[in-house]
Image (tube, helix red, strand yellow):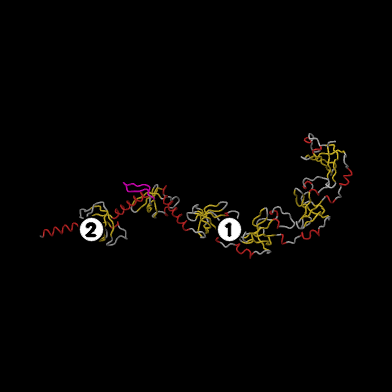
């Protein structure tokens, strides 16, 4: 009976003992902690022993359950030999293999720089990171050693249980994730920090942290600028507002001036019509000058509003960028963001008294100020300017260009022919200083008079000839042999006959067919 009981007790004891095998991972509980060793209860008939150096401080706690690798089921002392580090390493290796197959990323700590790259500790697995795959170009060793990074496993050595890693793919993936996250965070009207990474003629590209946005030149400043470099520089850290988002096209429109109050919001109260205000000339164009009245507010002085009297062909004849001028506000259009200014309205209009001051027929002195193809401009006093038409320079001489007869700056006398105050025009004449000689010319050269003339000019419609020093006539092309015209030159003599006399038009018609 006693034998049978002992046998049953032995069977129950044997069944309670776990079956463990070498090189397998088992779950064990810390039973005792000694200065150099830790006793582990793995449910076997004897306890296992592990060196204390294989434990982290956090793991050293009586009763804590951890995984261990069975190195020997029973050594000479009858104790199970276990390893905490090898269990961790085995689990780490399985994780590495799975991540490599799945294309995932693994975390690791750079432990040492060696020839050609870095050694990396990936949860107990030794990894090698080649320099060419590290993406650490230009980074100091002190900034990366003993720090955690994510890597992709590009090659596995099962025999040595080592791996080759790459960081380039993780950086790309991190950037993509960062961009996706940023796209979700960006909102129209939101203000974000960015760095100016490129400048073009039309604006600047700003890096918002993985996504670039365009800051157009028109959205940089309320003031007018000619180039983006006037507002930002490469590398500048700036705060910008999102104006528009297009996720499909990956386009972001940014604004810098929108973060500041719009100076045009109160423009009508600050610059009322008729007000006199000083400003700085900031730009000149063929049709006028732009004057800065306040920060971000400019007005235009049209070329017609510069002077009552002076004929201004180009504003840069009178102004330079930076000049301070006093102007009068003519109109304010807040919606169109336009202000019209005037310089001449600050002066008395001399044309109001022009008709009474310069009656028709009066002779006045003046100075030649400039030329046009059709006449010469003459300043008749310090306030007004008139024009001599080419037809009013000489009674008898054909004037092709007024500059052939007059010189700029020349002082001359002229006769007032007409005054139009409304359109600000005065017609002047030079030939009117002398009596009209054409009635006497008509008597001197009656029809059919034959005389010798000197060729002055040959044109498509006829030949101009000189009859006297200041008297010219025209031979029409049908009044001269066609063969003769091509060989004529200035100074040639011709026999001509008077066939037409027009006193009113001051013209003599001639014929060379005698």
* Residue lying at the far top of the rendered structure: 483
According to the picture, the residue beneath numbered tag 2 turns out to be 43
Residue at 68% from the left image edge and 60% from the top image edge: 341
The answer for how far apart the CA atoms under marks 1 and 2 are is 78 Å
Magenta range: 152-164
- Image x and y of residue 443, in percent: 89, 44
Q: Which residue is mark 1?
A: 221
Q: Is residue 158 magenta?
A: yes
Mark 1 touches mark 2? (CB < 8 Å): no
Magenta stretch: residue 46 in it?
A: no
**Between residues 118 and 204, which one lies in front from this camera angle?**
204
Q: Position of residue 422 (x, y in %)?
A: 76, 58
**Secondary structure category for the residue under label 1:** loop
N-term-proximal mark, 1 vs 2:
2
Residue 358 in which image quadrant? bottom right
Position in image of residue 301 (x %, y %): 68, 58
């Amino acid at each position: 009976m006693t034998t049978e009981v002992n046998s049953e007790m032995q069977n129950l004891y044997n069944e309670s003992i776990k079956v463990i095998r070498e090189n397998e991972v088992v779950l064990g509980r810390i039973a005792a902690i000694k200065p150099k060793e830790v006793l582990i209860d793995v449910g076997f008939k004897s306890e296992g022993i592990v060196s204390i150096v294989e434990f982290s401080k956090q793991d050293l706690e009586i009763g804590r359950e951890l995984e261990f690798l069975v190195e020997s089921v029973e050594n000479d002392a009858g104790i199970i030999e276990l390893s905490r580090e090898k269990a961790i390493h085995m689990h780490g290796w399985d994780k590495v293999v799975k991540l490599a197959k799945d294309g995932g990323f693994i975390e690791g700590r750079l432990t040492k720089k060696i020839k050609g790259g870095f050694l990396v500790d990936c949860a107990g697995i030794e990894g090698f990171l080649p320099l060419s795959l590290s993406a650490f170009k230009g980074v100091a060793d002190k900034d990366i050693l003993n720090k955690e990074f994510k890597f992709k496993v590009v090659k596995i050595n099962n025999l040595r249980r080592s791996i080759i890693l790459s960081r380039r793919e993780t950086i790309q993936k991190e950037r993509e994730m960062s961009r996706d996250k940023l796209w979700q965070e960006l909102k129209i009207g939101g203000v974000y920090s960015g760095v100016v990474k490129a400048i073009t003629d039309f604006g600047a590209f700003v890096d918002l942290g993985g996504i670039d946005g365009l800051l157009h030149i028109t959205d940089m400043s309320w003031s007018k600028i000619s180039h983006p470099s006037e507002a930002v520089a490469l590398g500048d850290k700036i705060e910008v507002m999102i104006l528009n988002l297009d996720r499909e096209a990956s386009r972001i429109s940014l604004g810098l001036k929108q973060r500041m109050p719009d100076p045009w919001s109160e423009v009508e109260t600050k610059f009322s019509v008729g007000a006199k205000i000083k400003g700085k000339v900031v730009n000149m164009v063929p049709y006028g000058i732009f004057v800065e009245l306040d920060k971000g507010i400019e007005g235009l002085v049209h070329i017609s509003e510069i002077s009552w009297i002076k004929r201004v062909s180009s504003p840069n004849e009178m102004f330079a960028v930076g000049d301070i001028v006093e102007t009068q506000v003519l109109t304010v259009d807040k919606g169109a963001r336009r202000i019209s200014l005037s310089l001449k309205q600050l002066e008395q209009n001399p044309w109001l008294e022009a008709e009474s001051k310069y009656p028709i027929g009066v002779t006045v002195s003046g100075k030649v100020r400039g030329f046009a193809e059709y006449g010469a401009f003459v300043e008749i006093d310090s306030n007004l300017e008139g024009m001599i038409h080419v037809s009013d320079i000489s009674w008898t001489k054909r004037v092709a260009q007024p500059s052939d007869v007059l010189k700029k700056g020349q002082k001359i006398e002229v006769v007032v022919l007409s005054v139009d105050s409304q359109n600000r025009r005065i017609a002047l004449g030079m030939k009117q200083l002398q009596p009209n000689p054409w009635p006497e010319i008509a008597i001197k050269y009656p029809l059919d008079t034959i005389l010798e003339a000197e060729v002055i000019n040959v044109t498509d419609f006829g030949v101009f000839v000189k009859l006297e020093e200041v008297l010219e006539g025209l031979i029409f092309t049908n009044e001269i042999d066609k063969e003769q015209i091509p060989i004529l030159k200035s100074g040639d003599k011709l026999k001509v006959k008077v066939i037409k006399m027009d006193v009113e038009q001051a013209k003599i018609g001639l014929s060379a067919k005698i």
